[in-house]
Amino acid sequence: MSAALNLQYPLLWNDEAECAMHSKHVLEYGYPKVHGEKNVVYPIRHPNKSLAINESTDAYTGIGWVMFYYGALATKIASGFEDIYTQTLFLRLPFLLIGFIGVWMIFKNLSHFFLNKREYKIARTLFFILLTLQIDFALHLREMRYYSIIIFLLGLCIHWLIKYRILDKRRLGFYLVAQTITLWLMYNTFAPIYLALNIFLVAFELVIWLREKKIMENLMFSLPAFISGLLLLPIIFFFDSINFSQQTSELHNFSGWVYLSHLKTTILYFVNLSYGWWVLGLGSLILILYLRKKIILRKTEFTLLGLVAFGLIYFFLINMVPHKIFTRYLIPLLIIEIGILVFQIIVIYKHLTTGWFYCLILALLGTFIYQNQDNLKGRAYELTHEYRGRLDYEIPFLKKQFEGIENPVLATNYEECSYMYYLDCKVVMGFVLNNREEDEKTQPDAIIFRKEWAWNYEKSTFDPFFKRGVKYDEYRLKVLDYPYNNIPDLSLPGHNHLFQTAFAATEEEKVVILVKKP
């Protein structure tokens, strides 16, 4: 409910619209081509404007293509509707559904390691309550982006591992094929979690070998990690992935100090906006109980250790991304964190009376709700009201202005893909000026310059459009000139997710649109 209500609002923001445009190009060309008939879809902000473009095919190689091919299905369905909100609903719905399936698979497979039905019922209730309260997770799960696909593929990996490696070892062949395909898809969705899974799977087999000394069996069950890597070599060469990583690291001056800063950012996120303190506190208590021999390592405890191990592997890997750490990179960690917390509570539950157990749960929920009350209130409001961002006002306005114009052209400095998708027009300049020389030769029918993105390039960049004697009328819309239509992050001071429509308090704060005079 938290993720699904009002799914059609607001219109797709920058990152979602980029996915929609690449998905549209998949339908038109068979792959995410950068240069389309009207527009250039290229979001990489880098001095090298050919970075992440395959020279021979003009394919975009800045990120894996799974979300674009999956998005092509959503784009095809959405194209059957005229209403922009019905389109938006069907663009997001397939991503939300696959995310739901992934969440359920993760819990259902982990539930094999509870000792009885009582533990299972407690864990199920806690898991979904804690997940529902985690607003960041819900906001990302509903996006037309790779986040929900990651959760689905993570659920699949866990399913194959538990069902065909731990519970039943008789179908080795099926496990090898299924896990290899899933890992291959994971890399082509989001590479960091692929690396984390591979390290975890190999480490898991190493631990089993130390206990059971069945080296051939362990080697066989390790094969998906190695086979998927071999199968990915053509992709890595085609995408020129090593060069891409090197150039982005150099651009952002990535270093050990930057890495430490990223670690600090991630830790503070989990402490301030998630269940970090509780995970650390309960983990310390369990360690003390274990050292005092109050806890025996059984399947529940071993599952907890496995979740902690995978969480730590991903934690240390994801902070190696060279640029800013956004919440989107932490989505897998959010659900793993909740899994860890649930298993911690189940382990401690055995040592508590019923009264103390309920006190623990009330304290957990109470402190989290108090700590995140503003976000929870905001999300409750958003679920019961229609949030509309700046694009929700700009798109209908521009549609009306472009009536009768055969091939309308818009100049803007951000969220260009949103205008491309909804208006089906040519959009020039954009965020990264990827086609500046050609774009300056055009004469836009409308111009939108977002003041908060002036740090990227100044408004004077648009001066060539005003030096040809063409006149523009100025229109001011009542909505706030906010940097984004909306963004799912809750940890960007000053630029956080908005839970309700923000209107301008002054003329200066209004969205300004310049429309070419007839």
Image (tube, rainbow, N blue to C red):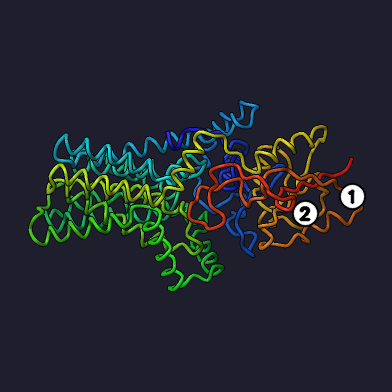
Q: Residue at x 55, y 48 (%)?
A: 487
Asked if residue 169 shows in the view, the reply is no
Kind of residue at disc 1: Val
Q: Residues within 10 Å of mark 2 (few under 14, many from 20)?
A: few
- The answer to which of 227 and 159 lies nearer the viewer is 159
Res. 224 mark: none
Numbered label tally: 2
- The answer to which of 164 and 299 lies nearer the viewer is 299
The answer to which image quadrant residue 156 occupies is top left
The answer to which image quadrant residue 273 occupies is bottom left
| 161 on left or right of 238 | left
| 47 on left or right of 216 | right
Q: Residue at x 43, y 73 (%)?
A: 256
Proximity of marks 2 and 1: CB atoms separated by less than 8 Å: no
Kindly state the secondary structure of the residue where label 2 is placed. Answer: helix
Res. 438 mark: 2
Say which residue label 1 marks.
Answer: 470
Q: Earlier in the sequence, mark 2 or mark 1?
A: 2
> Which callout, 2 or 1, points to the residue nearer the camera?
1
- Report x, y in % for residue 103: 35, 39
- Report the quarter where the C terminus lies: top right
